[in-house]
Image: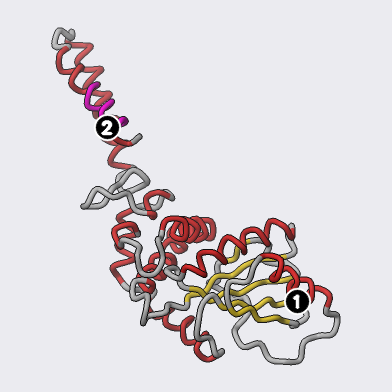
Amino acid sequence: MEHEHNETIHTHTTESVKKSALTTPGAIVVAGFLIAVAIVGTKFAGTSDTRNANGVRPVSARIGLNQNKFNACLTSGKYKARVESEYQEGVKAGINGTPWSIIVGKNGAFEIIEGAYPTASVQQKIDKVLATTTPGTTPLPVPTLRDGDYILGNKDADVIIYEYSDTECPFCKRFHATMHELINNNKGKVAFVYRQFPLDSIHPKTRKESEALLCAGELGGNDAFWKYLDTIFEITPSNNGLDPDLL
């Protein structure tokens, strides 16, 4: 599709050169048009049509982020500390694998999910939390909703699921689809918060992917964060297989 688009532009340009019999007023009009096109092109440089040095259109461009700003954010390393902080939260909670999730009700009741449970099994745990009327007394092992969290669904939902995850984990990829299904099925009662838990020993690429995800959120807000995450899980072959040029 993009190749055909480029060929169309090239043909149009070649044909324009052949038409040398333009009158002076006509030439002025054409020149003005070309200047306008150049201005528009400059205005939108670095957005969704941008390819990197290797000719690859990265995820950040696919979802419409400004490439200059995105690359500056990613190379700055400004989110390294946040990724490490979320990872250490998980370590403190006893997490040693991904996906790890906790279903939390408004009254503090919670259920922990260790692994990529199927939809029906997670729904059972959601229903159990929803049916709990006694306020929870056991301290939660991880922080609940806070400034800076990106949330999918209604932030005032009856249940919020917090997942600590790794973008190169194949089980996390499977569970991500499960979470979308659960949010759709529960119609406003369930929301989802994603946090970083890179498994460095087997997925050393994940930390940079986590930083990229947070850069997407900074530049494009909540919607861009989730679009970026959805696309990463869609295209990664998992197990440290994603080409860094695709970020």
Compare residues 200 and 133 and report the one nearer the observer: 200
Label 1: few (<14), some or many (≥20) within 10 Å? some
Compare residues 69 and 132 and report the one nearer the observer: 132
| Residue at 22% from the left image edge and 27% from the top image edge | 10
In percent of width and height, residue 151 lies at: 59, 66
Is residue 30 one of those drawn in magenta? no
Q: Amino acid at mark 2?
A: Asn
Q: Say whether disc 1 or disc 2 marks the residue closer to the N-terminus.
A: 2
| In this rendering, position of residue 54 left or right of residue 92 | left
* SS label for mark 1: loop
Residue 43 sits in quarter: top left
Question: Magenta region: which residues?
Answer: 4-11
| In this rendering, position of residue 238 left or right of residue 120 | left
In the picture of the structure, the residue carrying the numbered disc 1 is 106
Tell me the distance, in whole angstroms, between the alpha carbons under discs 1 and 2.
53 Å
Compare residues 68 and 239 and report the one nearer the observer: 239
Residue 32 sits in quarter: top left
- Where the C terminus falls, by quadrant? bottom left
Instruction: Say above or below: 86 vs 73.
Output: below
- Image color mode: secondary structure
In the picture of the structure, the residue carrying the numbered disc 2 is 6
Q: Amino acid at mark 1?
A: Lys
Residue 133 sits in quarter: bottom right
